[in-house]
Amino acid sequence: MLRRKLYTKIRRKAHRFYSIILLAMILVFNGCTTNKGDLTFNTPSPGESFNIYGNIYLPEIIETDSARASLTTLSDFSYFKVTAGEVTSQANKNGDFSLTGVAFSDSLVIKAVSNKIALLRRVTADELCYSDLSSLQIDITTTAEALVYQQGLLLKKDLSPADIRAREYADGIASITFALKLAMQLPKASINKTVLELPAVTSAAKEVAQKCIARDSILKDANTVLRHAFLREDLDLIKMYISPSFSNDWDSSSNWSDVVSYFEKLFSKNDYVSLTWEILETEFLENNRARIRTKVNSITKETQTDEISMNTTWTFDAYWQLEGTIWKLYKNMPYRETHPTQVDADVRWGEIALAHAELQAAVNSENIASLSYRISEAFRNAFDGNSTKNELILVATQRFNTMDVKISEYSIDSIKFNGNDRAEVTCSGRVKVVNILLGKDIDSGTVKAKVIWIKEDGIWKIYRDLPYKFTHPMTY
């Protein structure tokens, strides 16, 4: 009877070990990213330049500086000098212009000037790298938006086009364009430089920029409150700041109730060691919504043992919306270890999260059939010719009976999807176990691996290069 109890205890500990060591090393798809996983472009090479073509569009009535000053519309734009960075060219009569060899800049603004008339157009870094640069239009609206952007920079805030174009600032942008239209009807003698420097124009632009930044501050405050709610384990406050309509793109089971249930269980057995919450960027959207790129590092420990139970860093695009008078997080906040740790998660995250849940359940119940279901029949390791699916299952069974885990930790570097049915995962991890029968510790040290998953018959399965023995390579 004693031996049976001991054997049962060993098996329970062993399956816990196998859950952690296997999942720590193979279920690392939590950090899935595409080639542009951080939603940024590849940094241009030094000296890289761009050719920009466009048109000046100015149907507004202006005051001309001819011998007989009159209010009219322009029909000849050949007097406009167009500048972008260090490149300058003259516009054609119809307003077309070309700028060749414009150096990359993440704060590029094109300027078209003719006497007192000056127009602007901001060209974002994203536009330079991904958009069509053959037909950019410069008009009075692009000028107003560029002025707000420049005022934001003076206030140390890099406002995105979405920030400035949010619906609640439409009246503010209209006030800038109205001021510009009036200024263009003034005689040159009353304008020192160009219409862009007139106080009526700059003041209107600064006012819009300040409103954008004020809302940014409110959103930062909401993020701070939510962070403190987690640290204080204040479930009532968490309930308030998570929207009732909450969901995650990558996990169909995520909703308000699941968030509350998860943290209720977490708080009952764990405490936070630290929780850092960093806002990387904000983008205001229409209908009182905002995208906030957030980086969160969560370290928790078990209350009874003081052992670290989680040490995970997530970078994600959280979506907030104004509900009543409170900004609430309504979409995309990772909180489970199966959730992605990097931005740009898509529907495949849901598929792989399901694979994770099924595999974890199979391991916890020691269901070899279910475990086998998630391993490809063609499984092999390039670094071990003896590695097969059958051998992996055999090793797992042996570990169920002989080992217990002391330390298990891993971090996600990246995962690259090659097409829709193949994924290459890069990860780091460490496992320290004790051989129960021998009373001897075994420490893997830091393990770095690239594990290949494939989709067979609509099912994600482990396909290549899973280090599951201590004799396997510790680095890739």
Image: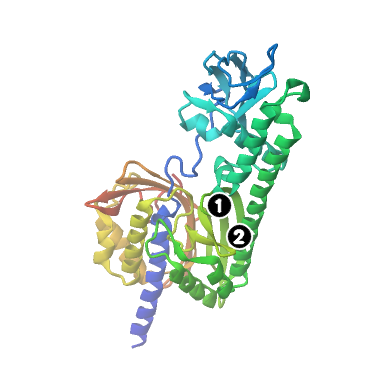
Q: Is residue 435 visible?
A: no
Residue 162 shows in this picture? yes
- Which element is circle 2 on? helix
Residue 359, image x and y in percent? 33, 63
**Residue shown at 41% from the left, 67% from the top:** 17
Q: Quadrant of residue 89?
A: top right
- Residue 235, quarter of picture: bottom right
Query: Pointer 2 and pointer 1: residues touching (CB < 8 Å)?
Result: yes
Q: Which mark is residue 223?
A: 2
Measured in 3D between alpha carbons, the distance from the residue under mark 2 to the one under mark 1, in whole angstroms, is 10 Å
**Residue type at numbered disc 1:** Ile
Disc number for residue 300: none
What is the count of numbered marks?
A: 2
Residue nearest the observer in this picture, 463 or 57: 57
- Residue furthest to the bottom in view is 1
Local crowd size for mark 2, using a 10 Å CA cut-off: few (<14), some (14–19), many (≥20): many
Residue closer to the observer: 108 or 378: 108
